[in-house]
Image (cartoon, grey):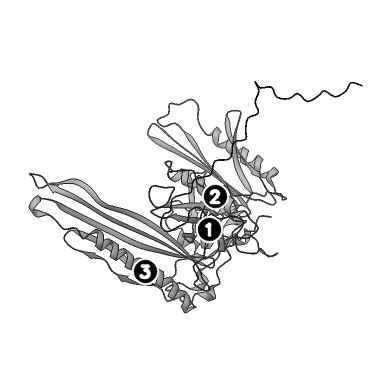
Amino acid sequence: MSPPAPDVPATPDEPIAPIEPEKPIAALPAGSGIDWNKTISGGGKLTRSAGDEAEYYIISFNPPYDMEDLSHNDNDSFVTIYKPIFSCFANDAVNDAVNAIIEQETNDYISDSQEAFSVTNDVENGLYYRKNGWASFYVEIVGNYINIKFERMINCYSYVLDESEYEEFVETVTFEYTTKNYCLDLKTGKRLTIEDIFYSDCDLGKLLGVAIASSLDGWDTSLKRPFRGLPENWTDFSISSGGELMIGFPESNPYTASSASIAIPLWKLREHIRIEDTDMALVTKLGSEDYADFESEPYTHYLINTDFSVVTLEKDGVDIMQVVQHKAGEYGLDSINPEIEKMCRDMAAKIPSDIIWEYEPTINKECYVNVNIVSVSLSLAFSVDGKWSINEMRASFDLDTGKRLTAGDIALLDHPDLDASLAYLSTPMPDNIAESTNACLNQYGTAIIGWGDGQYSAFIERRFINTSLWRNIK
């Protein structure tokens, strides 16, 4: 056996390179009194219990309020602001907390606008000013959270008059557009930090960092620097009834040139965020509404959710949609996907090949998973010799069984108020409409039912939908 080869020492011509120390990351500049270097790490503040699951149905509404008009107009300044005043919450501390936020923002806006508009016309030198501004509050209850979005604008510019007395712009003296978000606990009125609504078993820093970075890139491609993460104890956020987590960035921040309010779809976060259904006992007054009018709505109304995605592939020159699952479960996709493929082929076959088009025909396709229901909608429109041909095909499937639902499954067609809601139809629905499979539940919890080879359709309101079909995804 040969002895092991000796180690060969480095020759003077081959020096060993020293290890370069890592360059320290420069600290972010301060802005709006926030330490942007202390970012969220780890999870949220909520401990997940065994019974905590993502909610698919959420009550959301605008609580009633009284209104105080604080607008004022004079010869060269126009300011519009309406201050809502709330007394509808069962806990007086909640009413006080909401009103205190609105009062503070109102007073700050009035003070700031008065300061910005303090410049006066210099008639002797022919210099004049136009001043205008507005502020508005939008308040929603989503689950057991009170969400306030505040927007304000202050604008002042100078101009001179030409020989014909027309205004000529000189410069912008002031321009400010700002949004702020507040999220309060409906039970206590406490203003929440973003960690307060997330479970502790998620990597919240990474989760929000990636989501915000991608959203900011879409909102403003000229970021000052790469996004490092959201500062800890962040309070500038709210939850919208449209299914979005709104996160605000103030006027002075290290990433964007001005203030921004970005939207992150809740479906990206729903396994980690707690949104429980509204405890209606916490609201004592609903104005002209009644408690019975408020039903939990599905907030999974988006094209693609975290458990499924929709892909399109070309087969024999036809774009075919398929639903793909990402989460373990027993689903009927083996039955649903062939039905979707057949719909795509049938729609493509409706395009004639021996005519000259005025408008190139295009098939518009939608497919989404809404709770436990897969819905597909295809539409084709083209014009020949000035006449439009419109074709629409729809379908909804039970995700668990793969069964294609009929109009009678989806809608309460025997409801006594249905005919009155469809009075707008010029062509009434046929008597056998309940058997039609040209029907689908849409992403907003309503439905569309078609007949006459897709030439006619009816919109079915939410109150006529058979919600007993809706079940959580496994």
Q: Can residue 88 be seen by looking at this rendering?
A: no
Does the residue at mark 2 contact the one at mark 3 (Cβ under 8 Å)?
no
Q: How far apart are marks 2 and 1 (CA)?
A: 12 Å
- Say whether residue 421 is left or right of residue 80: right
Q: Which of 123 and 322 is in front in this view?
A: 123
Question: Mark 2 or mark 3, which has the lower sequence index?
Answer: 3
Circle 1: element type: loop
**Amino acid type, mark 1:** Glu
* Along the viewing direction, whichever of 440 and 193 lies nearer the viewer: 193
Closer to the N terminus: mark 1 or mark 3? 3
Q: Using the image, determine if residue 168 lies above or below residue 13.
A: below
Where residue 258 sits in the image (x, y, percent)?
38, 50
Position above or below: 427 against 105: above
Whether residue 305 sits left or right of residue 84 in the image: it is: right
Asked if the residue under mark 3 is in contact with the one under mark 1, i.e. CB atoms within 8 Å, the reply is no
Q: Quadrant of the N terminus?
A: top right
Quarter location, residue 48:
bottom right
Crowding at dot 2, Cα within 10 Å, few <14 / some 14-19 / many 20+, comes out as: many
Q: What element carries label 2?
A: helix
- Mark number displayed over residue 104: 3
Tell me the number on the disc at residue 232.
1
Residue 413: horizontal and vertical position, in percent?
55, 59
- Amino acid carrying label 3: it is Gln
- Report the side of 335 relative to 183 (left or right): right
- Rendering coords of residue 469 (x, y %): 63, 58
Asked if one can make out residue 145 in the rendered structure from this viewpoint, the answer is yes
Residue at point 18%, 58% (across, down) = 76
Q: Which residue lies furthest to the front in this view?
A: 12
Q: Is mark 3 on a helix, strand or loop?
A: helix
Q: Residue 209 carries which label?
A: 2
Identify the residue shown where x is 43% and y is 26%: 356
Q: Residues within 10 Å of mark 3 (few under 14, many from 20)?
A: few
